[in-house]
Image (cartoon, helix red, strand yellow):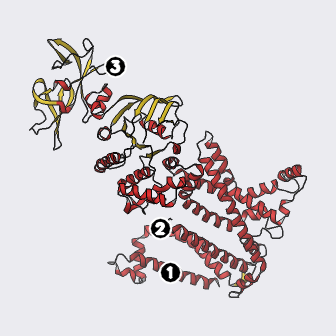
Amino acid sequence: MSRLSISDVRKHFGAVDIIRGVDLEIDDGEFAVLVGPSGCGKSTLLRMIAGLETVTSGEIRIGDRTVNALAPKDRDIAMVFQSYALYPHMNVASNMAFSLKLKGVPRAEIDRHVGRAADVLGLRPLLARYPRELSGGQRQRVAMGRAIVRDPEVFLFDEPLSNLDAKLRVAMRAEIKLLHQRLGTTTVYVTHDQIEAMTMADKIVVMRDGTVEQIGAPLDLYDRPDNLFVASFIGSPAMNFIEGAVTVNGTARFVAKDGFSLQLPRLPDGALGRKVVCGVRPEHLQLGPGGFDAEVSVVEPTGSEMQIVVRAAEQDVTCTLRKRRDVRPGDRLALIPSPESLHLFDAETGRSLH
Amino acid sequence: MDAVLDRDHDSRMAHDASLAGHSRSEPRTNRASSTAPLPPGRITAALRAHWLTVLFIGPAIVLVVLVSIYPVFDAIALSLYATKYAEKVRFVGLQNYVELLRDPTIWKAGANSLVYTLGSLFVVIPFSLAVALLLNRPSRIQGILRTIAILPWVISQTITALLWGWLLSADFGPVTYGIDALTGVRVAILASPVWAMVALIWINVWSSYPQATLLLLAALQTIPRELYEAAHIDGAGSTASFRHITLPLIRSTLLVIVIQLTLLYFNMVTLVYVFTGGGPLSSTETLALRVLKTSFENWNLGHGAALGLIITLINLLFSLLYIRTLRSPKP
């Protein structure tokens, strides 16, 4: 177990900047998730930590060692690949034992390590099988077993669940989290799925275009997104954004372009006299007067809740209702957000206005 | 004789056909009639019903029978006769085979074939694998390198043999000249029994390695990059990666190549015939070359046919052995 520090790390492929200066501290035993849309550089950053990509500039430290120039095998890390990368010609036991075998660890000790990892992951009955004889979930588990056997300082996961079906993904998500709680090894996990990030992480790192947009605990990112990108990326269904301006008439109010206005809990700094975007999460909209009227266009019941898409301020606004209601397309509803849950952003810079 | 042979041959064909018909109709039990021999009227009816099928597959069957099946049976028959030029003189049973097996020069040719085949395989496998590994690395001039690597393959064996014959010529060969200039010794490579075989093996490898390289390159490219990355993280250097990842994953391709090349080398005539003609002192005369010489230089077609069949049997044996190895479960 070790602390992982990344300071001002950059990566160029020719003239293309992939990583443009990333600073990141991951504490000992922490579960950090790098999340962002495809092409944001999250996998490249992970591969740089693993030593599979060179670092153009900056420093990566694992524990108290700078690892920039170290080969992957000397970094004391273990990686789980998206494709699992199991050796197809070796059975499960040999796959898990490979790194120890290369190190020249005695047979008996290898067996003990493999046995322990197999017990942790429930792989005992599969040890003699070949990867082609395993299901997707089992392969995933073997890939984790291979990582555990090495007892590394840092675990690296590169989108490990994206090849699994939805149900299995949820189960494995919990399993990985449980495993982390049990082993307490520092973990860096890459995903494009914000739900995975929210459910698993101690710390989420939201990336875009090779830079970090925001770092924080899952609920911090949900409650206080720094900018429009993080606000739109975290949370499902995504936050609604309505353009408008802020006025003060006794109390501070947000006025949407087409006229309706919403009460704000306070006047944010520097919000007056500029174009703003008001963000409101679907789950923070309730039925009731004092907000705005809208016409229902789509109703999507999921059982536990209802998602309604309405037309307001000349755009679609999504609303999640916890209580069942007889709502049909074409109905008119009055919706009101709770004032505390409104987010205001500068329309030009996208920065949050607190 | 031919009439006898043809009748024999025809009846065999009919037998085969009825076998085929039988097995085909087996699953369709409702067509019980097709298992019994068809009366002539029914055959015409069947032909009329399936004339399009017959039209399409007929020519192919005729062709295969004429150029592939008939010659085999003709050769079997021929090997049982004493011959004079292309004519069968009298039936001698297995006499030709006995004479061949008693001939020490045949055993010598067999040994030459073995040395030539195994020697070539021994060199060509590591060589083609090394070239494939080099070509598999990303390079800006990859296209050019691949073209160069394939060139020997597209040159006909006759040209290859003539080209190398000239290069190694004792009188005016550049290689001979080079060795002379460096060491002061004028070597006549093709006049030495040992060196002639070495040279023959080398040009054989030179002309056939691209075939193996291409197959190996294709196999190497199917190995996912993540496997090497995983091995890299697991602590494998390039030697360990090659041993534990590359080699096991191209194993079946290697086996296929070994089968192909064994058969190719064992039956090779053109290259040997043009390059050394079997000399000096029959030191490079292989069994395959001996068939050609016996049949069409000494005009002993009976012996030639018998030897040809022996070679065919050896080929069959090789193939069966390899197929078994290929089918055996992975370790």
Quadrant (top left, top right, bottom left, bottom right) of the N terminus of chain A: top left
Q: Quadrant of residue A5?
A: top left
Badge 1 and badge 3 both on one subunit: no
How far apart in space, not on screen, are marks 2 and 1 (Cα)?
Answer: 19 Å
| Location of residue B41 with respect to B57 vertically, above or below | below
Give residue A349's mark: 3
Q: Mark 3 lies on which chain?
A: A
| Location of residue B120 with respect to B25 vertically, above or below | above
How far apart in space, not on screen, are marks 1 and 3 (Cα)?
Answer: 87 Å
Q: In which quarter of the image is residue A36?
A: top left
- Front residue of this view, candidates A12 and B103: A12
Give residue B55's mark: 2
Question: As drawn, is A69 to the left or to the right of B118?
Answer: left
Give residue B14's mark: 1
The percent position of residue A305, horizontal first and vertical second, equals: 16, 40
Near mark 2 (Cα within 10 A), the count class, few <14, some 14-19 or many ≥20, is: few
The percent position of residue B20, horizontal first and vertical second, equals: 45, 76
- Front residue of this view, candidates B206 and A227: A227
User: In the image, what residue type sits under mark 3?
Assistant: Thr
Sequence-wise, the earlier of marks 2 and 1 is 1
User: In the image, what residue type sits under mark 1?
Assistant: Ala
